[in-house]
Image: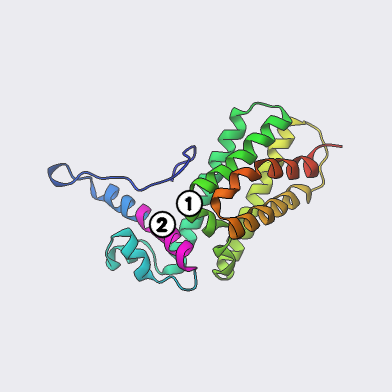
Amino acid sequence: MVGGQSSFAPQVLPRGRHAAPREIVAASQRGRVLLAMAAAVAEKGYARTAVADVIERARVSRRSFYEHFANKEECFLAAYDEGVTWLLDSIAQAVADAGDDVVETATAGARAYVELLAANPDFARTFLVEVQGAGPAALARRADVHQRFADQIADTFAAIAPGAQLPPYASRAAVGAVNEVVTEALVTRGAGALPELAGAVMDIQLRMLRPR
């Protein structure tokens, strides 16, 4: 999963005489397992997903799975972490490319967020919905991720409006509001509906963070 891409997919490796080195094969297996975890959880829910579901989708052996992860929870959290890093990096790049106008910057970040989730519905379901039912470690990870998003938003607006005083809770509140709106649309209308929320996401951020 690499920042800047609209989607992520496992690397295709050569076979036979030109087979890839062991480390590359292992990295490819790990990537396929993470994608398979997201797909299985999106289809069945975290509680009903078993390791067998993941290895079947990833086309790896059970032994290969346990070479990378101790259990289902560890694999799920790794998939969540890598997806979040990819998402944050991609949004940051979109914001950087937009310049320093507050409206254009907010628009670029909002559009990147909803379009990336829409293009990756399995991850969207994992990121927004299933993480809430994956146990205390997942909830702690989710809280940390929300703070990372809040920090990213705060840094963006600080760069745009140097010296502006924003309440410390404002960026975190914006993240919570955006998360609620996007999750509701995903659950009720599906990932395909998310791009139309770019304007709403932008409006939430501007209303909560624009310097007074």
| Image side of residue 203 versus residue 19, left or right | right
The answer to whether the residue labelled 2 contacts the one labelled 1, judged by CB atoms less than 8 Å apart, is yes
Residue on which disc 2 sits? 34
152 above or below 71? above
Q: Which residue is drawn at 54% across and 41% down?
A: 89
Q: What residue type is disc 1 on?
A: Glu
Residue 52 visible in image: yes
Total marks shown come to: 2
Residue 38: say if magenta: yes
- Separation (CA) of disc 2 from disc 1: 9 Å
The residue that label 1 is drawn on is 82
**Foreground pick, 131 / 157:** 131
Which numbered tag is attached to residue 90?
none
Write down the quadrant of residue 106 in the picture.
top right
**Is tag 2's residue or tag 1's residue first in the polypeptide sequence?**
2
Badge 1 local density, few (<14 within 10 Å), some, or many (20+)? some
Q: In which quarter of the view is residue 200 placed?
A: top right
**Quadrant the C terminus occupies:** top right
User: Which amino acid type corresponds to the residue marked 2 in the rendered image?
Assistant: Leu
Compared to residue 67, the image places residue 22 above or below, namely above
- Asked which secondary structure carries label 1, the reply is helix
Give SS at disc 2. helix
Residue at the outermost right position: 212
Residue 72 spot, x, y in % from top left:
43, 68
Q: Give the dominant element type of the magenta stretch: helix, strand or loop.
A: helix
Q: Residue at the far left: name it.
A: 17
User: Who's the residue at 81% across and 33% down the image?
Assistant: 163
Magenta stretch in the rendered image: 31-45
Q: Was residue 60 drawn as part of the magenta stretch in this picture?
A: no
Look at 27% across and 50% down and name the residue there: 25
